[in-house]
Amino acid sequence: MKSYYLILFFSFCTIGFSQSFVFKDSIAVANQSFKMIDTDLNNSLYLISETKIEKRFQNKASKIIDFKNVITSVDATNPLRMYIYSNFNRLSILDEDLNPIQDPISIKSSDYIPTALKVIDNQFCWFYDMLANKLVYFNYQLQKAIVISRQVYLKNNDQAIEKIHSYKNFVYLKGEQTIYVYDDYGNFKYNFELATQNQPYYFYKNVLFYIQDNQLIKVDLTTKESVTLFPLRFIKSIAFNETNFYAYTGNQVYVYSVN
């Protein structure tokens, strides 16, 4: 209840970067096995557990799909083409109704161990190869590496790269406490420390949202400027698009409109 009252108290919060968040709804979640959420440009909500994804459409209908593999990451940004990476070697591509667009694709695990993967389009992806400790630009349809970076030197006690984000000409590698920035030729540019260890976070375009000390924070990945937005407590996962922000507590998803 305390978190709910905080949300009501801060239901209208004008922030930097010319945006405001207005609390508008809460969605009950009966199944507490979901570990994270995502959304797309159509404001569908994705509830993700170890092996399953439940999609709740805007018309309140829902659909569940079981991959029977441990889900590594989900990219639902494009509502017409959803990418699910599972078991560190299997890429599934689904349409807006969660039907397969093609057979699942296996990344050759004998050559690479991609612990983080980001699909760019219907042919290419970036992934971090834990085996060689390198960033790889990969044609997953032809199973061919296009660009392989030099070794990634992890800093600030980072143990691995947990997520990759790409926007325009830059690739962002997310460690536990550091963001590593590369250009789209696989050349290292710079890094900066960001204490997000074991905290919910979400990449969107050139911005990273994350929670620290029960505060929602927004950092510009280009300028590294950060703004503290408003308090959020007991949050397990967050998601963002052009019009809505979502915060998942384990039994509720709080929905904010973004103006």
Image (cartoon, grey):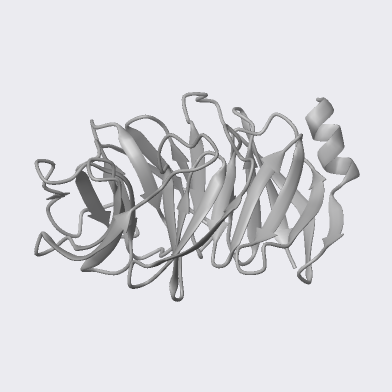
Where is residue 259 drawn, in percent x and y?
Answer: 75, 68
Q: Residue furthest right?
A: 9
Going by the image, does 157 lie left or right of 139? right
Going by the image, does 62 lie left or right of 16? left
Q: Residue furthest bottom?
A: 169
Going by the image, does 113 lie left or right of 194? left
Q: Is 173 placed above or below 64 here?
A: below
Is residue 59 visible in the rendered image? The answer is no
Where is residue 193 drawn, in percent x and y?
Answer: 61, 48
Residue at the image position 71 percent from the left and 59 percent from the top: 257
Q: Nearer the viewer, residue 139 or 170?
A: 170
Q: Nearer the viewer, residue 167 or 12?
A: 167
Going by the image, does 122 lie left or right of 152? left
Residue at the image position 23 percent from the left and 45 percent from the top: 132
Q: Is 141 placed above or below 161 here?
A: below
Where is residue 198 drawn, in percent x and y?
Answer: 57, 31
Where is residue 155 drawn, in percent x and y?
Answer: 50, 43
